[in-house]
């Protein structure tokens, strides 16, 4: 199974890590593995892949996040800053 197959399937690894879609990277959709989290804690690590034609098993980016809610707020703040610069509002 490729990372994209695992994300499509919502695959869960034996250790509880799970595959999910992250925001696109370089125009490709981005399957991602969320792991190294501890139940009851907000921290998690993310490995981001892509579904392009070049090797799909190469991790494109890895990062640690201390709070999913902070990540959401970050995305909302970036979207707010970018909105005036978009050609199509709401795109
Ligand atoms: Zn942390």
Image: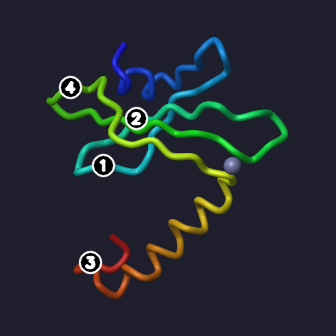
Of pointers 1 and 2, the one earlier in the residue sequence: 1
Q: Is the residue under label 4 in contact with that under label 3 (CB below 8 Å)?
A: no
Label at residue 31: 2
Q: Residue furthest left?
A: 53
Q: Image height check: is 69 above or below 64?
A: below
Disc 4 secondary structure class:
loop
**Which dot, 2 or 4, sits closer to the camera?**
4
Of pointers 1 and 4, the one earlier in the residue sequence: 1
Disc 1 secondary structure class:
strand
**Residue 67 point in image, percent of width and height:** 69, 54
Q: Give the crowd class for mark 2: few <14, some 14-19, many >=20 residues within 10 Å.
A: many
Residue positioned 31% across, 42% down in the render: 29
Q: Indicate if the residue with disc 1 has its beta carbon within 8 Å of ligand 1.
A: no
* C-alpha gap between disc 1 and disc 4: 14 Å
Label at residue 88: 3
Q: Is the residue under label 3 in contact with that under label 2 (CB below 8 Å)?
A: no
**Residue 19 point in image, percent of width and height:** 51, 29
**Residue 63 point in image, percent of width and height:** 50, 46
Of pointers 2 and 4, the one earlier in the residue sequence: 2
* C-alpha gap between disc 3 and disc 1: 20 Å
* C-alpha gap between disc 1 and disc 2: 10 Å
Question: How has the structure been colored for display?
Answer: rainbow
In the image, 54: left or right of 85? left
Q: Image height check: is 29 above or below 5?
A: below
Q: Is the residue under label 4 in contact with that under label 2 (CB below 8 Å)?
A: no
């Amino acid at each position: 199974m490729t990372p994209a197959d695992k994300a499509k399937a919502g695959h869960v690894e034996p250790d509880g890590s799970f595959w999910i879609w992250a925001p696109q990277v370089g125009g490709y959709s981005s399957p991602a593995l969320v792991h190294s989290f501890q139940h009851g804690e907000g921290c998690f690590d993310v490995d981001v892949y892509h579904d392009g034609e070049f090797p799909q098993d190469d991790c494109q980016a890895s990062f640690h996040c201390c709070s999913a809610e902070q990540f959401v707020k970050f995305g909302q703040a970036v979207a707010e800053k970018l909105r005036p610069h978009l050609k199509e509002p709401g795109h």
